[in-house]
Image (spheres, rainbow, N blue to C red):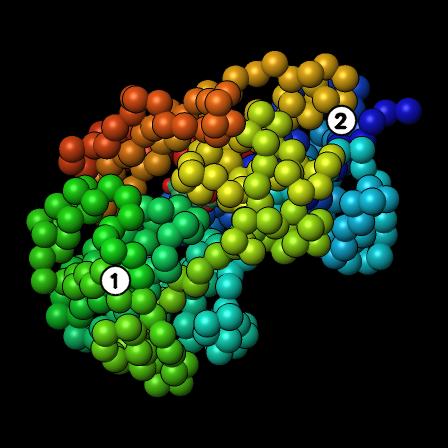
């Protein structure tokens, strides 16, 4: 009988793992379970806010998986996991068995501090837009409808969160919209962190040179309360009134990780063995992507690389071969500072046997300034990773 590998989550991590498992180990019985009918890319979704991308351009179908006979693609939500019996259940109560489970659920938002924002109705007024999709369009429409001279407030949670440069790229795109359509408007960034978390020089250059007078950045000023009706907010230092309010909430591993009992770091993230991505809490359960507790950034690029290391290790474990890997992988993350120009941060990480951790290797770097050439590279990066993830 074929050994069963089940992957939950068809995002950057899970879909990549599924694709490479089918390529590398056709002898396995592979199932990919994804709750959404389409894949929507977070990378480039900030450009929707300036009008430089449409949501349609970021939507991809799961047609490769639907057509591929070497994989079972189930569009359903996983609602329960029993790791003793090695079974999981779908929302329609059907059961799926596994020998090895790969969990790649991305993130879920933490609303303990701001429960008022947890409801879908509240999020129509105060979108997070931190999972690309309808909320990204809501936020873009709110910007378009904003009164002349209005104030946009964006709040950034304390790190770690999905996509460290993402909020600051978003600031550029909002400021670009204001510059072109509402030049007396303003963007106020209330950041819980002591400083810009990633690509600081790139963003501060752009804010000073391209968006002078449009962006006010306040570090160490976490959001404390929100009035959803009036859009009044209180932060650690002061209170403000927004015309458009974008709260990026703190995050933790997606709910399936909690169902499987693999959240064991700060009540938020999943500790794994970086050679196999097997959970340190539950055997035969692997975790990849943003849900993993790691010193590497929570990026699509990293999710893609973790997926390949994990796929190779799962195959080796199922063949009873001890995985003899010393993984090395890279991260490249582009950020657009306007419609055409981008800059990058790149790093290489290598498995260190002594600390059993993925440590930064002395290489990589950051763009000195943004350019249109890098904007083309950023587009190439996106097209490549979409193709590598989805086939
Ligand atoms: P996801 O891609 O979120 O996939 C998780 C999947 O699991 C989802 O499809 C979800 O529907 C599914 N799922 C969850 N629960 C269940 C369930 N119970 N049952 C079934 N399915 C389930 N990264 C970069 O490298 N470069 C960038 O330029 C970049 N830009 C970004 C810009 C923004 C605005 C944002 C928000 C993020 C950006 N990122 C970027 C980060 C990147 O999107 C994430 O790191 C990446 O999506 C993580 O992949 P993942 O597979 O862990 O999670």
User: In the picture provided, is 144 more to the left or to the right than 386?
Assistant: left
Asked if residue 161 is positioned above or below residue 126 in the image, the reply reads above
Quadrant location of the N terminus in the rendered image: top right
* Residue at the spot of label 1: 220
Q: Nearer the viewer, residue 154 or 148?
A: 154
Residue at horizontal 25 percent and vertical 28 percent from the top: 365
Taking the image as drawn, is residue 280 in sight? yes
Q: Nearer the viewer, residue 161 or 48?
A: 161
Percent position (x, y) of residue 24? 67, 18
Percent position (x, y) of residue 159? 38, 52
Numbered badge on residue 115:
none
Rate crowding at label 1 as few (under 14), some (14 to 19) or many (20 or more) other CA atoms within 10 Å. some
Residue at horizontal 46 percent and vertical 72 percent from the top: 113
Q: Residue furthest bottom?
A: 230
User: In the picture provided, is 115 more to the left or to the right than 374?
Assistant: right
Q: Secondary structure at mark 2?
A: loop
* Residue at the spot of label 2: 70
Q: Secondary structure at mark 1?
A: loop
Quadrant location of the C terminus in the rendered image: top right
Residue at horizontal 78 percent and vertical 45 percent from the top: 83
Residue at horizontal 62 percent and vertical 27 percent from the top: 276
């Amino acid at each position: 009988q074929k050994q069963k590998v089940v992957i939950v989550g068809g995002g950057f991590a899970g879909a990549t793992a599924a694709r490479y498992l089918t390529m590398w180990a056709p002898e396995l019985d592979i199932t990919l379970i994804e709750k959404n009918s389409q894949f929507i890319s977070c990378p480039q979704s900030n450009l929707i806010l300036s009008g430089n991308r449409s949501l349609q351009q970021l939507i991809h179908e799961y047609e490769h998986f639907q057509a591929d006979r070497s994989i079972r693609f189930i569009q359903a939500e996983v609602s329960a996991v029993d790791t003793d019996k090695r079974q999981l259940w779908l929302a329609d109560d059907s059961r799926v068995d596994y020998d090895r489970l790969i969990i790649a659920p991305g993130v879920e938002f933490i609303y303990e501090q701001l429960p008022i924002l947890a409801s879908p109705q509240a999020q129509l007024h105060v979108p997070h837009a931190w999972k690309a999709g309808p909320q990204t369009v809501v936020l873009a429409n709110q910007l378009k409808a904003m009164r002349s001279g209005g104030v946009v407030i964006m709040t950034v949670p304390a790190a770690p969160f999905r996509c460290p440069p993402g909020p600051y790229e978003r600031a550029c795109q909002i400021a670009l919209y204001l510059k072109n359509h509402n030049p007396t408007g303003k963007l106020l960034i209330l950041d819980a962190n002591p400083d810009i978390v990633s690509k600081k020089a790139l963003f501060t250059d752009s804010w000073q040179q391209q968006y002078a007078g449009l962006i006010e950045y306040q570090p160490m000023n976490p959001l404390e309360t929100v009035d959803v009706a009036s859009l009044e907010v209180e932060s650690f230092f002061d209170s403000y009134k927004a015309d458009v309010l974008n709260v990026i909430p703190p995050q933790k591993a997606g709910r399936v990780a909690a169902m499987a009992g693999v959240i064991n770091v700060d009540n938020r993230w999943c500790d794994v063995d970086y050679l196999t991505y097997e959970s340190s809490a539950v055997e035969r359960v692997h975790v990849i992507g943003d849900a993993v507790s790691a010193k590497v950034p929570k990026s699509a690029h990293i999710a893609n690389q973790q997926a390949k290391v994990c796929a190779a290790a799962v195959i080796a474990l199922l063949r009873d071969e001890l995985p003899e890997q010393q993984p090395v992988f890279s991260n490249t993350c582009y950020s657009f500072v306007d419609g055409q120009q981008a800059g990058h941060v790149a790093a290489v990480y290598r498995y260190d046997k002594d600390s059993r951790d993925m440590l930064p290797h002395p290489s990589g770097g950051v763009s000195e300034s943004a350019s249109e050439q890098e904007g083309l590279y950023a587009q190439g990066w996106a097209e490549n990773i979409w193709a590598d993830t989805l086939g």
